[in-house]
Image: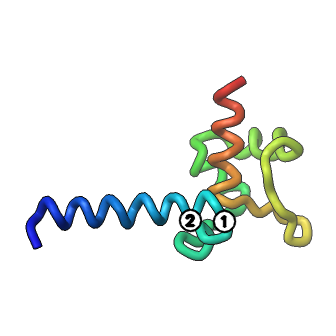
Amino acid sequence: MTNYELNKLASAIASEIVRKVKEDETLLDELFPPRCMNAQEAAAYMKIPVNTIYAKANEIPHMKAGKRLVFSDRGLIKWMRKEGNK
Protein backbone atom coordinates (compact mmCIF):
# COMPACT_ATOMS: atom_id res chain seq x y z
CA MET A 1 0.00 0.00 0.00
CA THR A 2 1.38 3.42 -0.91
CA ASN A 3 1.63 6.39 1.47
CA TYR A 4 -1.16 8.09 -0.47
CA GLU A 5 -3.45 5.09 0.03
CA LEU A 6 -2.55 4.86 3.72
CA ASN A 7 -3.29 8.57 4.22
CA LYS A 8 -6.60 8.24 2.39
CA LEU A 9 -7.57 5.23 4.54
CA ALA A 10 -6.54 7.01 7.76
CA SER A 11 -8.59 10.03 6.76
CA ALA A 12 -11.64 7.86 6.07
CA ILE A 13 -11.28 6.13 9.44
CA ALA A 14 -10.89 9.45 11.27
CA SER A 15 -13.99 10.84 9.53
CA GLU A 16 -16.00 7.78 10.55
CA ILE A 17 -14.87 8.10 14.19
CA VAL A 18 -15.87 11.78 14.24
CA ARG A 19 -19.26 10.93 12.72
CA LYS A 20 -19.90 8.19 15.30
CA VAL A 21 -18.88 10.41 18.22
CA LYS A 22 -21.20 13.17 17.00
CA GLU A 23 -24.04 10.62 16.91
CA ASP A 24 -23.28 9.31 20.39
CA GLU A 25 -21.19 11.52 22.70
CA THR A 26 -20.81 8.69 25.23
CA LEU A 27 -18.29 7.17 22.80
CA LEU A 28 -16.02 10.14 23.49
CA ASP A 29 -15.92 9.22 27.18
CA GLU A 30 -15.03 5.64 26.26
CA LEU A 31 -12.27 6.66 23.86
CA PHE A 32 -10.92 9.51 25.99
CA PRO A 33 -12.11 9.39 29.60
CA PRO A 34 -12.63 12.85 31.09
CA ARG A 35 -10.07 14.07 33.61
CA CYS A 36 -11.54 14.95 37.01
CA MET A 37 -9.97 17.76 39.03
CA ASN A 38 -10.36 19.50 42.36
CA ALA A 39 -10.76 23.30 42.54
CA GLN A 40 -7.01 23.96 42.71
CA GLU A 41 -6.31 21.74 39.69
CA ALA A 42 -9.22 23.30 37.77
CA ALA A 43 -7.86 26.79 38.48
CA ALA A 44 -4.41 25.80 37.25
CA TYR A 45 -5.96 24.13 34.18
CA MET A 46 -7.83 27.33 33.29
CA LYS A 47 -4.97 29.60 34.44
CA ILE A 48 -7.21 31.57 36.79
CA PRO A 49 -7.09 32.17 40.57
CA VAL A 50 -8.69 29.54 42.83
CA ASN A 51 -10.88 32.30 44.31
CA THR A 52 -12.46 32.76 40.86
CA ILE A 53 -13.37 29.06 40.77
CA TYR A 54 -15.25 29.38 44.04
CA ALA A 55 -16.79 32.76 43.11
CA LYS A 56 -18.12 31.36 39.82
CA ALA A 57 -18.96 27.87 41.09
CA ASN A 58 -22.65 28.47 40.37
CA GLU A 59 -21.75 29.03 36.67
CA ILE A 60 -18.95 26.48 36.16
CA PRO A 61 -20.12 22.89 35.63
CA HIS A 62 -19.10 20.70 38.56
CA MET A 63 -20.17 17.86 40.83
CA LYS A 64 -19.97 17.66 44.59
CA ALA A 65 -18.19 14.93 46.48
CA GLY A 66 -19.18 15.72 50.04
CA LYS A 67 -18.05 19.31 50.54
CA ARG A 68 -15.52 19.14 47.71
CA LEU A 69 -16.11 20.42 44.19
CA VAL A 70 -15.07 18.15 41.33
CA PHE A 71 -14.60 19.50 37.79
CA SER A 72 -14.13 17.65 34.50
CA ASP A 73 -11.84 18.93 31.77
CA ARG A 74 -14.69 18.72 29.24
CA GLY A 75 -17.04 20.73 31.44
CA LEU A 76 -14.38 23.39 31.93
CA ILE A 77 -13.66 23.59 28.20
CA LYS A 78 -17.37 23.95 27.36
CA TRP A 79 -17.76 26.65 29.99
CA MET A 80 -14.68 28.55 28.77
CA ARG A 81 -15.97 28.43 25.19
CA LYS A 82 -19.37 29.72 26.31
CA GLU A 83 -17.74 32.52 28.32
CA GLY A 84 -15.54 33.45 25.37
CA ASN A 85 -18.61 33.88 23.17
CA LYS A 86 -20.27 36.43 25.50
Disc 1 packing (10 Å; few <14; some 14–19; many ≥20): few
Q: Amino acid at mark 1?
A: Asp
**Residue 81, labelled with which disc?**
none
Disc 2 packing (10 Å; few <14; some 14–19; many ≥20): some
Q: Quadrant of the C terminus?
A: top right
Q: Quadrant of residue 52?
A: top right
Toward the left, the furthest residue is 2
- SS category of the residue bearing label 2: helix
Q: Position of residue 50 (x, y in %)?
A: 71, 46
**Residue 20, labelled with which disc?**
2
Name the residue located 64 percent from the left edge and 29 percent from the top edge: 84
- Which sits in the foreground, 45 or 86? 86
- Which sits in the foreground, 13 or 28? 13
Asked if residue 54 lies left or right of residue 38, the reply is right
Asked if residue 83 lies left or right of residue 61, the reply is left
How many tags in the picture?
2
Q: Quadrant of residue 29?
A: bottom right
Q: Amino acid at mark 2?
A: Lys
- Looking at the picture, the colour scheme in use is rainbow
Q: Position of residue 48 (x, y in %)?
A: 63, 39
Asked if residue 11 lies left or right of residue 86, the reply is left
| Marks 2 and 1, how far apart at CA | 6 Å
- Which sits in the foreground, 34 or 65? 34
Asked if residue 30 lies left or right of residue 11, the reply is right
Name the residue located 72 percent from the left edge and 56 percent from the top edge: 39
Name the residue located 56 percent from the left edge and 65 percent from the top edge: 20
Write down the residue under mark 1.
Answer: 24
Q: Position of residue 58 (x, y in %)?
A: 88, 44
2 and 1 marks in contact (CB < 8 Å) = yes
Tell me: residue 62, above or below residue 32.
above
- SS category of the residue bearing label 1: loop
